[in-house]
Amino acid sequence: MTDLRTFIELVRTKRKADVVDVERPVSPKYETAAIVTKLEERGRSPMLLFRNVEGSEQTVVTNVCGSMGRLALALGCSVGEVASTFSSRAQVPVAPRVVEAGACQQVVRRGADVDLGILPPLVYHLDDAEQPYLTASIVLARDPQTGKTNLSYHRMMVAGRDRTGILMERGKHLHGIFEKYAARGEDMPVAVIIGVHPLVSLGALYSGAADVEEYDVIGGLMQQPLDVVPCVTNPDLYVPAGAELVLEGVVTHDARMHEGPFGEFTGYGTGSTQTPVFEVAAMTHRDEFLFQDIISGQMEHLVLSMPGIEHRTRTMAASIAPGFVNLALPAPLTTVIAIDKADDDEPRRLIEAMLRADIYAKHVIVVDADVEPGDLRAVMAAMALQTQADRQVHVFADEQGTPLDPSCPGEDGRSAKMGIDATRSLSSTRSVTRNRLPQDLLDSIDVKEFKAKR
Ligand SMILES: Cc1cc2nc3c(=O)[nH]c(=O)nc-3n(C[C@H](O)[C@H](O)[C@H](O)COP(=O)(O)O)c2cc1C
Ligand SMILES: [Mn+2]
């Protein structure tokens, strides 16, 4: 079984130091976030099971995917192989298998029995809205034109027994699907799954063409079919049989509510906005379900997104720049790409395509193949020593970015973007040489000969 419980057990056996069980009472307001923040300050990022969160019965499981080591365990590879394993498996689709019954429907609550108030009312930051949020919420919807299932994470603000706000960023597939339903005056049927195996999480964060069936990507990552069952209120939508909790319903095409503020992955909150409304028609779950959570703005939020974003960026960069070598994502909204360029215009073409293709690509820096893109000193040095700013800094006004960027002027996410070409000119007529020494001479020197006197 590929579910959250089997993964927790796997971590207990293979990476004991990665699991912390917290039996003492913990407040849902700020305290789980404070514990994770404090541990991360000390360089620790364990998975935590809070058994006694005040105000609810459920065990809260947080930070499941908060380390590369655990992602590697889920994929069955080494830490260094996570990106390449994700990429290669994501490209070998495996369709899900529909099964008769799923543990996710052991308890079925419909209509008046739906109550989001039974869930742990988690609040993360001082300036966040008072209402609790669902953060490990994966939203599943079917594109009405292609029929393909899309899965993606969306923050949801609980706003009553059977209602939440839902943030769908412009430029993401779910927003596009929502617009298609709304254009016909229809509500968008969705299922929200909470409490899943890390490979389901990673598959939901796969980011490719809109017409990819993302359930098949999850199967690819698992190298076996994912067991799914039809929703109890909607035979067209399937949910992982082993999920802990499922919310079924619609995002209505016309209603809006005040949502936020909410401290985001950037480390900032950007006030409250109007978002569409998710109306919950049914809530199904395991008998004693685990409530999965992601502490917003902490390690897991970033680590979990990494393989999907890297895969997307790598695939795209390689298709535009044949000499693509490597990339790094060292800060929010920032991509550094190393290429072995064939002509002096190639970095600009790459920059423009990358900035246009991804709302989260705001700054793109291109360096030569001999610069390690994750080494920020080397990147800054390349910018200082290879860039002539009047020709090699490319600024684009009014592109689609994200309103979660605190510098973004408006709620529509329109934003300036920038690319810096920090590659050496191929056409320079100046005689520029890199400091060198004869290699055989270097090889002949034995440093042991030059001991200092003690
Ligand atoms: C923990 C977490 C929370 C996220 N919250 C949101 C959100 O509230 N709204 C949003 O549009 N994207 C959010 N994302 C990003 C999308 O889930 C992600 O970009 C996804 O890959 C988009 O899928 P798509 O390529 O099918 O559009 C979140 C990602 C993570 C890891
Ligand atoms: Mn998608």
Image: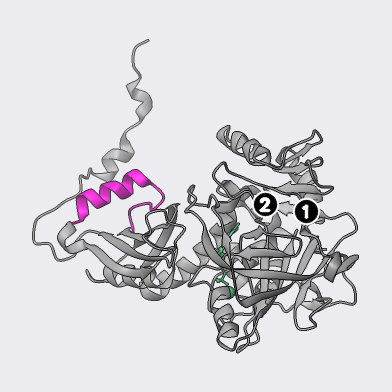
* On screen, residue 15 above or below 110: above
On the question of residue 83 being in view, the answer is no
- Which structural element holds mark 2? loop
Instruction: Answer with the quadrant where ligand 1 appears in the image.
Output: bottom right
Residue at 75 percent across and 58 percent down: it is: 195
Residue linked to disc 1: 119
Name the one closer to the observer, 315 or 187: 187
Residue 209: percent from the left, percent from the top? 53, 78
Mark 2, residue position: 132
Q: Position of residue 251 (x, y in %)?
A: 65, 74
Q: Is the CB of the residue bearing disc 2 within 8 angstroms of ligand 1?
A: no
Q: Is residue 372 magenta?
A: yes
Colour convention of the picture: one colour
Do the CB atoms of the residues marked 2 and 1 lie less than 8 Å apart?
A: yes
Residue 320: quadrant of the picture: bottom left
Q: CA distance from mark 2 to mark 1?
A: 9 Å
Residue 133, x across and y down, in percent: 66, 54
